[in-house]
Amino acid sequence: MPRRFLVAYFREEESLLTAVRAVRAMGLKVYDVFAPYPIHQLSAAMGIRKSRLPLATLFGALTGLLVAIGFQFYANVLDWPLNVGGKPDNSTLAFIPITFELTILFGGLITVAALLLRTRLFPGKQENLLAEGVTDDVFALVLRRSDLRVVAGAPWPTDVRKVLDACGADDICETESQ
């Protein structure tokens, strides 16, 4: 079932930020914003909360730490204890380099896996740009048409168009996407 979107095009980042703030002040949810370069105030204007990706990194790092210590303890103490130079079997100082390396490795791998899963990126995925020219020099604000009706007391799309025009939109059009 195709989804319908309202796309507003802008030439300047200030107009885009003004439009995002105005749409959010109306109580509407911004589906997406496209820009040719990062805009630092955009996350706050869209109401995007901080990423939980560092928690995945912490989980991966702690997993690597526990796997490294557990495996080294098992191998050196339980499975194959060797008396080398009178050192104790569970010599913690000897475990540090491998533990550090596996902590970094697991943290990095889990972070990449969480990022790819969260963003739904996978090999062979087709890009789905809702607005033409956004990778060149155009800023675009995308509103999902169903969100305009779902929000209690939400204005009709004609009111949204008026607000976007007042914010300096160059063009406003409707598009469909899978």
Image (cartoon, rainbow, N blue to C red):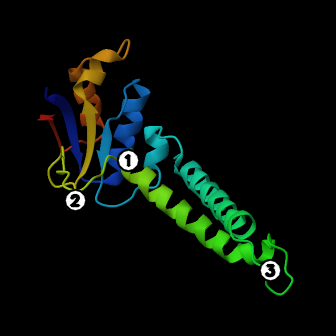
- Amino acid type at circle 2 is Thr
Q: Can residue 98 be seen in the rendering of this structure?
A: yes
Q: Can residue 155 be seen in the rendering of this structure?
A: no
Say which quarter of the image contains residue 90.
bottom right
Say which quarter of the image contains residue 137.
bottom left
- Amino acid type at circle 3 is Asn
Q: Which mark is residue 135?
A: 2
Badge 3 is on which residue? 83
- Amino acid type at circle 1 is Leu
Q: Residue at x 72, y 73 (%)?
A: 95
Q: Are marks 2 and 3 in contact (CB under 8 Å)?
A: no
Left or right, 90 with reference to 67: right
Badge 1 is on which residue? 117
Identify the image quadrant of the N terminus: top left
Q: Which label lies toward us, 1 or 2?
A: 1
Q: Dot 3, crowdedness within 10 Å: few (<14), some or many (≥20)?
A: few
Above or below 154: residue 99: below
Task: Report how far apart the C-alphas of labels 1 and 2 lie in the structure.
Answer: 24 Å
Instruction: Name the spot of residue 37 as percent of width and height, x first.
Output: 33, 61
Instruction: Name the spot of residue 33 as percent of width and height, x first.
Output: 31, 45
Q: Residue at x 57, y 55 (%)?
A: 60
